[in-house]
Amino acid sequence: MNNMKIIKEYVLEQKNLIKKTVEKYQINKKLVIIQSVSDGATNAYVKGKCKDCDEVGIAHEVIRLDESAHDIDYLVNLIKKLNIDETVGGIIVQLPLFDGWDVERVQNAIDPRLDIDGFHKLTKFLPATPRGMIDYLNDNDFSFTGKNAVVIGRSEIVGRPMAKILLDLNMNVTITHSKTTNSDLRHYLENADLVVIAIGKANFLDKTYKFKENAVILDVGISRIDGHLVGDCENDVQCYFKSPVPGGVGLLTRLGLLKNFIDAQME
Ligand code: NAD
């Protein structure tokens, strides 16, 4: 047993607060989601974001692109029009884009004040996944200062920003990646108070890894095995708390997006 809030319950509680904020400040601008690729996983992510908006009373619109009719210039022009549309309060360009489209060019076309994904080079928003995780840890009174964090994975959207935030919160941060030796990884993990893993390798951390009794593991990874969602770490490793997959960091990420949207309206 541990004292960490059950993520599903925490998210519900936070959504209720967001709903009250939307009502109180009469937030009526809409979130626009632009979708390129239309596979099962991407459709599910977009559907989830729309459902979240519905639950808290945020208006939303999904614009779907057609690869045979549209090119990247069309998308950049569309974003420029949305940037100056008074009814728009936030823009998400759902990844992945169509093959060969320059993601950075598209992300940097969004007005940074509307970039609630936090991907623009001048953004003031934290990317949604790190924001969701940090808010959750804060809500649980996690003590950061002087403690050891191991971040596994160095992607631009999770590993790197998370490591920087934890460093800013006075943690001793180790980033490990595909070139880290397994014996070093095991050594770092044995001393970690917080582990964030985001590599996309199903059950990479298993029961042969040893963790501190007080270790908190946030499992970002999502893989699909036989139709089931699986994290980067087995759900039943010995530690203080391990975020489940499903029902863990994915929910925190969606919450992070809603919070960024609300913050964007409070300028
Ligand atoms: P990515 O796929 O861009 O990069 C993977 C990273 O893992 C790289 O930095 C690579 O160096 C590292 N890596 C690969 N093998 C490794 C190994 N053996 N040991 C240590 N590091 C290794 O990463 P991403 O976009 O951060 O996504 C990672 C996973 O997290 C994916 O499963 C993705 O679907 C998931 N994800 C989930 C959420 C969520 O809301 N739950 C959000 C973003 C990403």
Image (tube, grey):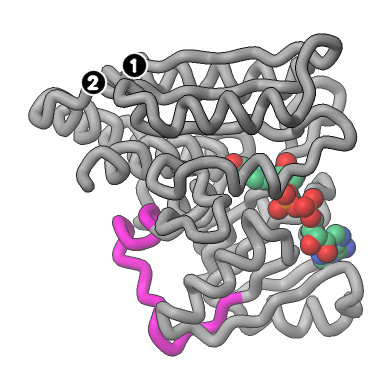
Looking at the picture, tell me which residue is in the foreground, 120 or 239: 120
SS for dot 1: strand
Taking the spot 83% from the left edge, 84% from the top edge, the residue there is 184
Question: Which disc, if any, is residue 59?
Answer: 1
258 horizontally vs 262: left or right: right
Classed neighbour count for the residue bearing mark 2: other residues with Cα under 10 Å, few (<14), some (14–19), many (≥20): some
28 horizontally vs 180: left or right: left
Taking the spot 79% from the left edge, 37% from the top edge, the residue there is 223
Looking at the picture, tell me which residue is in the foreground, 168 or 146: 168
Taking the spot 47% from the left edge, 17% from the top edge, the residue there is 50
Give residue 110's position: percent from left, percent from top: 52, 41
Question: Which disc, if any, is residue 28?
Answer: 2
Taking the spot 58% from the left edge, 72% from the top edge, the residue there is 163
Which portion, as a residue range, is magenta?
135-149
Give residue 266's position: percent from left, percent from top: 21, 44
Does residue 177 lie above or below 101 as drawn?
below
